Amino acid sequence: MAERLIVIGGDAAGMSAAAQARRRRGTDDLEIVAFERGHFTSYSACGIPYWISGLVTDREQLVTRSPRTHREDFGIDVRLRHEVVGIDLVRREVVVHDLSGGVEVRERFDTLMYAAGAVPKKPAWARTDAAGVFGVQTLDDGSALRGWLDADPQPRRAVVVGGGYIGVEMAEALVRRGLSVTLIERGEQPMSTVDPDMARLVTAAMRGLGVDIRTGVQVTSLSERDGRVCEVVTDHGSIPTDLVILGLGVSPNTELAAAAGLPLGPTGGIRVDRRMRVSGVPGVWAAGDCVETLHKVSGLPVHVPLGTHANKQGRVAGINIGGGYATFGGVIGTAVVKVCDLEVGRTGLREREARMAGFEFVSVIVESTSRAGYYPGARQMTVKLIAERPSGRLLGAQIVGWSEAAKRIDTLAVALWNEMTVDDMTALDLGYAPPYAPVWDPVLVAARKAVDALAR
């Protein structure tokens, strides 16, 4: 009998692991069954806001590999609309609920890949049966929202609750569709993934697009009329609306794992080693938004739910399941986002995180341009660096700018990953031509300013 791999979750981490295991093991040697509770596999959840806005015209453009592709090209038995509801580690079985047929079955496994992703944070006030309240976590969520936007009567007003990546992207998407949009953030700023001085630039750009941003506001309840949401009630008054988007962040989807006795770390994610093996549980692997991982700068466990990490972690797990050897080196929190025409990038630690990790540091901000100042199309760019005192090691970086800004964060991420000092960075041999950069690239200008700040 062939060894049997069961995969829980049919998106980035799970299907990357399945595909890598298949490449290393023949169909006669390894049977792979993947259970996915939704209607899609291997899709870009990050692309949903662009489909909602109309920039991406077809939902299928977001699907990288369909269930048919997985079945025909990789020999993976993908079962959609099947939710794993129990794991029996003693009997080496999973309990699976067929959401379409309504029956439950038990399926044996020799090896288990847990890739259940993350679940949206949903406070008590958001648990309502009123129509018009949406999360944007999965492609099924996006399809439901798109249907609501296209149906009659078409909504004219929207409230987005939460100012993280999804919140700001969805606010822009809805403005592009012609809705009047209010964004509510209970903190002091949207985009808490960057420091307040950088977030102010994002806030100004969003307000310039027409988004009504209200910070320091807490939602207390939702009101409905005729079964549809009609009002968001806050501690600062009520806001009429036809649509509510929940962008309150996510938590690791580990309820099933915890019930089975899989170990969880302090972030709530599953604890895994560098090969993505679940700690202390033979034959069980985990990857993606359901696990915690090591932050290479702070040395602390973190939960950073991004598709880039999920795909890499799934690949590592699959190589190891298939008999190879691979490790996942951790994360440094690199991310980019488009907000209106503004580009925002960040990597490493923010000031608050650096303090919490016990670092002494300096931080500097420089204003520069994306191209030579005389070249047409040059736009402003703001770069912030955080460097350890007295070593000068780069701890974090943030960039906000209008064009050619966000991808410069990759240069800083490479420097951070390789533990470079800001003094090292001043000598980086970066490309220069007037259409692409000033003679002193903004990254180099910021590094020089950080060296000067350390000298003081």
Image (cartoon, rainbow, N blue to C red):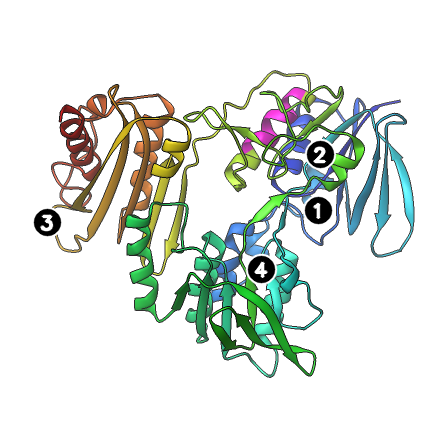
Determine whether 90 is above or below 437 in the image.
above
Crowding at mark 3 (Cα within 10 Å: few <14, some 14-19, many 20+): some
The residue mark sitting in front, 3 or 1, is 3
The residue mark sitting in front, 3 or 4, is 3
The region drawn magenta spans: 312-320
Query: Of marks 1 and 2, which one's residue comes earlier in the chain?
Result: 1
- Disc 1 marks a residue whose amino acid type is Pro
Q: What residue is drawn where x is 29% and y is 62%?
A: 204
Q: Identify the residue under disc 4.
A: 59
Q: Identify the residue under disc 2.
A: 114
Residue furthest to the left: 374
Measured Cα–Cα span from mark 4 to mark 1 = 15 Å
- Disc 2 marks a residue whose amino acid type is Tyr
Q: Is residue 298 left or right of residue 389?
A: right
Q: Identify the residue under disc 1.
A: 67
Query: Of marks 3 and 4, which one's residue comes earlier in the chain?
Result: 4
